[in-house]
Amino acid sequence: MDESSQPAGKSLPALLALPLLLVLPALAVYRGFGPTVCTYVAGWATAISLLTFAVYAYDKGSAGKDGQRTPEALLHLLELLGGWPGAFLGQQWLRHKSAKVIYQVVFWFIVLLYETVAVDWLLGWPMARAIGAAI
């Protein structure tokens, strides 16, 4: 069975990857600001992820009908604003933007940025200090 004939959203490694990718950013926010702010950040991340997923679904539908497409820059902006988990799910479940290499490079750069900032925050900002000292 090739990839295109498999049911969308049935990849167990992909479903396990998202919670793992969310651990470090959630831990960094919780450790840095406490449970109250963490709740607000989680609410924002959920809302922007739902919006991002909805925009992915709209764009996927438009692509099949030769309709008005959503600019990739807008999709990346939504990801950068915290909607990358919704984008990840949209890529997995809707199979949208998952095969376009340059799009994936930018998407994974955004995810890596979130992970790097979270690790740096948890470690007391050594990378940020080193960059600041080098400038």
Image (cartoon, rainbow, N blue to C red):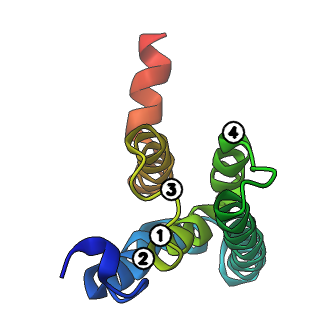
Pinpoint residue 21: horizontal percent, then vertical percent. Answer: 40, 70
Alpha carbon separation for disc pair 2 and 4:
23 Å
**Mark number, residue 95:** 1
Q: Please, what is the three-letter code of the amino acid marked with disc 3? A: Lys
Mark 3 secondary-structure assignment: loop
Give the Cα separation between the discs numbered 2 and 1.
16 Å
State how far apart marks 4 and 1 are (Cα): 19 Å
Tell me if label 3 and label 1 are in contact, CB under 8 Å. Answer: no
Sort mark 3 into few (<14), some (14-19) or many (20+) by Cα contacts within 10 Å: many
Residue at horizontal 47 percent and vertical 73 percent from the top: 22
Q: Which residue is mark 2?
A: 18
Q: Which residue is mark 4?
A: 73
> Mark 3 sits on what residue?
97
Q: Earlier in the sequence, mark 4 or mark 1?
A: 4
Q: Quadrant of the N terminus?
A: bottom left
The kind of secondary structure element at disc 2 is helix
Whether 82 is drawn above or below 26: the answer is above
The first of marks 2 and 4 along the sequence is: 2
Q: Name which of mark 3 and mark 2 comes first in the sequence.
A: 2
**Residue 62 screen position, x and y as percent:** 73, 61
Alpha carbon of mark 3 to alpha carbon of mark 1: how far? 7 Å
Q: Earlier in the sequence, mark 4 or mark 3?
A: 4
Looking at the image, residue 73 sits to the left or right of residue 44; the answer is: left
The percent coordinates of residue 41 (x first, y second) are 72, 72
User: What residue is at 31 percent from the left and 80 percent from the top?
Assistant: 5
Identify the amino acid type marked 4: Ala
From the viewer's perspective, is the residue at label 4 or at label 3 nearer? 3
Identity, as a three-letter code, of the amino acid under mark 2:
Leu
Q: CA distance from mark 3 to mark 2?
A: 17 Å
Query: Which class describes the residues within 10 Å of circle 1: few (<14), some (14-19), or many (20+)?
Result: some
